[in-house]
Amino acid sequence: MQEQLKQLKEQAMAEISKVDEKASLNEFRVKYLGKQGLLTQILRGMRDVPAEQRPVVGALVNEVRALIEEQLSAKEADFEKREMESELAKNYIDITEPAQGHERGALHPLSKVFELLIDSCVNMGFKVVEGPEVELDYYNFEALNIPKNHPSRDMQDTFFITDNILLRSQTSSVQARTMEVMKPPFKIISPGRVYRNDSDATHSPVFHQMEGLVIDENISMADLKAMLIVLMRKTFGEQTQIRFRPSFFPFTEPSVEVDVTCPSCHGEGCRLCKGTGFMELLGAGIVNPKVLEANGIDSKKYRGFAFGFGVDRVAMVKNGIADIRSMFKNDIRFLKQMK
Amino acid sequence: MKVTYNWLKDFVDIEESPEKLAQRLTNAGFEVEEMIYQNQHLHHVKVGKIEKIEKHPDADKLQICQVSLGGEHVQIITAATNIFEGAVVPVSLPGADLANGVKIQKSKLRGVESDGMFCSGEELGIDDSYIEGASVNGILILPKEFKIGEDIDVVLGLNDVIFDINITPNRPDCMSVIGIAREVCAIYGKPFKQPNFKYITVGDRASDHIAVERKSKSCSRYMAAVVKNVKIKKSPEWLRRRLFAVGIKSINNVVDLTNYVLVEMGQPLHAFDKNMIEGSTIIVRDAYDGEKISVLNHNTYTLSPSDLVIADKQKAMVIAGVIGGTNSCITDQTSSVVIEAAVFDLKSIRLTSRKIGVRTDSSARYEKGVYFGSAEQGMKRMLSLMCELEVGDIMGGIVDKFDYNPLEKVVTCSCKEIDEILGVKIAQNDIQRILNGLGIDCKIEGGMITAKIPAYREDLENAYDLAEEVIRIYGYDVYDNLSTSLFEKSKVTEGGLDDKTALERRIKNALMYNGFFEALNYSLCPPDICEKLNIQDNRRFMVKIANPIGEDISCLRTTMAHSMLSSLAYNMSVGNKQVNLFESGRTYAPKSLPLAELPSETNWVSMGSTAMDFAEFKACVLSAIEETGLRYHLVRSQEGFLHPGVSADVVDESGNVYASFGQIHPLVAKNYELPKTTMYGEINLDKLIPYKDKKFVVKPVSKFPIVERDLAVVVKEEISNADLMAAIKSACGKIFYDVKLFDIYRSQALGAGLKSMAYNIKLADENKTLTDEEVTEVIGKVLKALKFRYGASLR
């Protein structure tokens, strides 16, 4: 009987290895493990086995049965797996078909640059303050030490509405408005739209500036430099350098123009910067004490710095845009490049 | 302001090259915008002598000239007619790049070789005031003494370099050669060589010949000198060439000297023909209303009392500080001259110059400000030069009328203050050296600076001004390698976005994620946009610019719609047919016209699409609105530029409108040449700011399952989805969870004017699992309610 079992085992193993479809697997199960199955038939001979040998034979029977069952389920799992694989192989889609819903759009290059500049300043403790674009002559000029009919008015071509109301020619107008309402120390930036009577490839009658103003007790030109280098590095990259050149603005003293290393050549000199390695970008300086006093801030106690610059130009430089007018055309072929 | 390298050298010894000087001036705050080399178009041009002239064999108008260049010999073909054998002429050779843009190369003219070209004065960039014969129409015939073969710039003395310098408004004293020269002295630490002010007088006193009456506050000083037995003639060569270098035409000796002093000293002067001054009295007065004067630019101007004139007893002779009249100017017959050196109010001159549209070298200086002492310096320099040129007999004394003599200004501050402003330490002896170098008499004792400010520096008033003087000469490069840390000595301040910017960003991003691209438009527009947009309300009243560039940008927009629709139309016109745009910007509503106070400015986000239908567009508008916590519903829009049947307003429960959107009105579509299906929307950002924060109260979620039922009802077309949903919600009572419209069906079988609306209704109870009976009962109530209120029937 032991011999019979051994033979059965070998026969079953040989047979199952040849099974190659799910249906035959069931036939195999019936043939060996069914009520009339071969193993069952052998078991019927158990009663002829001497009592002392029964445990040994019994164990052998269980072993053979377990082996067959194990093989059966392994085979079964294998068939299922193959079935799923062939199913997966049939079910595929063209993943390059267009997505549904809306493809995302994009912000204007100006907005992107504004966000970058504003966030950099906010992180340095600046509050964002906006002011009106249609402005009183007083805030745009007089409160900034630019009296009526003064030669320094010639620095800008202004659009006038009436004798006393104009389209602001600089976001500096927000300086005076801020000083009226905020108590030092404070740091503010004022991003916004400005207007000048000027139009060509590099000048738009409508453009954008960002003004910064810091008033505290121990402010110096060195603080201005330290702050602007952080801002310019956030804007144009970590290797950016800046330099001061003397200049004149009625509301700052000393006044400087701030040159920034060309973002294209980093100071080596290239076509973009006309070989100078630098770009003239900002106007800045220590707030003229006359401006502080005119706006009710004690110039003996407080000092401040201010800076301002054209943001359209920053966006143009950063994105290689040559003509400022293309910024206002809204051609989708231009805007799509900002995605 | 133009000054020349050689002219500066009259007042300061300069060792560095013009290029280095330009750099140093720029670094000190005097930006050299352009350097013009007088000889930049004169290379490859030599003095030649025509030795032989023959006719060209194949051309009637051409001649073949054999020309000697000293050792060398060239052949030149020319069409010029004023040449002759033996003439000394400028010859441009291959490589020359002449002032009129002509570039010379070897060429063949009708088969005969030409090695170059003879030059006219124009081709060399000079005229008669520089050298005789330069203005003739033909070749410039040079003096016989010129050395044959020499370079033309050498023989003509065209070796100066002109600096065009941008003078900032705070430095009117530097609108002169001596002003720049003083800066050069400070930069190099060199002494300033004073101009010559000496002259010899002859005969009577000036006051015996001329009287001055100063009758206007706009003139703070008026000086007059008298020169008799004047000989008006051509100026000497050196004077003509100096003026030529800075772009001033030579006229005659007297006029040229006034111009010379203007450039050199920065003091405008005027010369009168004394015999034309009625009553020998000069009256400085405000013009009479309507007073007319004919001036040297051949125009006649009508003046008003805000203009200042220099008159005699009969007539206005000069528009003060701006331009002289023809009735008293210097002519060849002039034998007696009155020289004026005056100080006028800068605002008055500026106003008059703007009003009549005349800007002269004189007005340009007066409107920047001429200091009190300048008149005297200018007058003395003028007389000294007249003496040197022997123009005539200078009468003794100068008539001088003024109302005040400014006090000497002294600024005191500490060296520490300078250091604190600059944030860098400057040694005391550097401060002293720099200030003294600038002509500021400066003493430092115990760290305290006492600075006596020279009269020409009216801009210096306090420590800040001195700090700037120190640092611009010391050099701003001191900051290049400074490593101050951020706000080292300042208080920490809280940064942050304002509410509007914060909300604007969220709304812009919502639209951007929904496929919209951000546009940027001028806030200026033409005056007729409201007609184009079918707008009937107050938005038709727009703020107008008094001095616009053009009519298309002459008004401030009162609606965002024009900008957006124009942008869409532009895209259509270039073939971009499916476009979604948004713009964030302002409108400007006047409270009254003409403006008495500032208009109210409103922040908007507008949207436009030529790609979306109403449903898609609505989803985008609402996703933007839902960035806020506004509780809203939609009502039909009354907006003029929207299609009345296919548009909506976003309103709150009180009916306040926060946004309007929909298909544009067919009339508007036609006016902008846009498709009828174009969508436009606008969101009032400012009105949404109070709702910028979404407020959440989270209720616990029921642990019992949701039960769903679908229900389709047939209703009349005019019954809205919103009404049906509201009715379903209220009929379900407290077990209502959600309802959604999932299908709308119309067919002939249903009947005309009817539609089938299919809803998916979700029900849930907080405390138990709903039974089938409960659900059926509720759905029955819903049906009853829909039937009762809207005549709905189950489909």
Image (cartoon, rainbow, N blue to C red):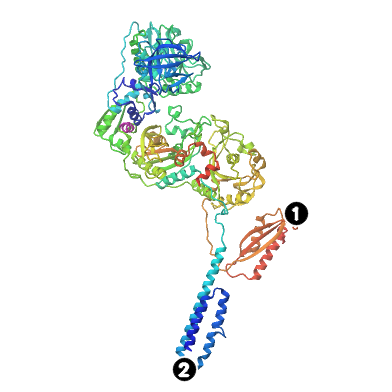
Location of residue B221 in the rendering, given as x and y in whole percent from the top left corner: 39, 18
Indicate left or right for B315 with B256 as reference.
right
Q: Nearer the viewer, residue B183 or B123?
A: B123
Residue type pointed to by label 2: Ala
Kindly indicate the quadrant of the structure image that contains residue B233. Answer: top left
Above or below, B286 against B539 in this view is above
In the rendered image, residues at marks 1 and 2 fall on the same chain: no
Location of residue B74 in the rendering, given as x and y in whole percent from the top left corner: 39, 17
Residue at label 2?
Answer: A51
Range of the magenta residues? B466-473
Label 1, residues with CA under 10 Å away: few <14, some 14-19, many ≥20: few
Residue at label 1?
Answer: B752
Q: Residue furthest left?
A: B446
Residue at 52% over, 61% down: B698
Could you say which disc has been placed on residue B458 in the image?
none
- Residue B612 seen in this snapshot: yes
Q: Secondary structure at mark 1?
A: loop
Question: What predominant SS class does the magenta segment belong to?
Answer: helix
Above or below, B247 against A280 in this view is above
Q: Chain of mark 1?
A: B
**Quick check: is B467 in the magenta stretch?**
yes
Residue type pointed to by label 1: Ala
- 1 or 2: mark nearer the eye: 2
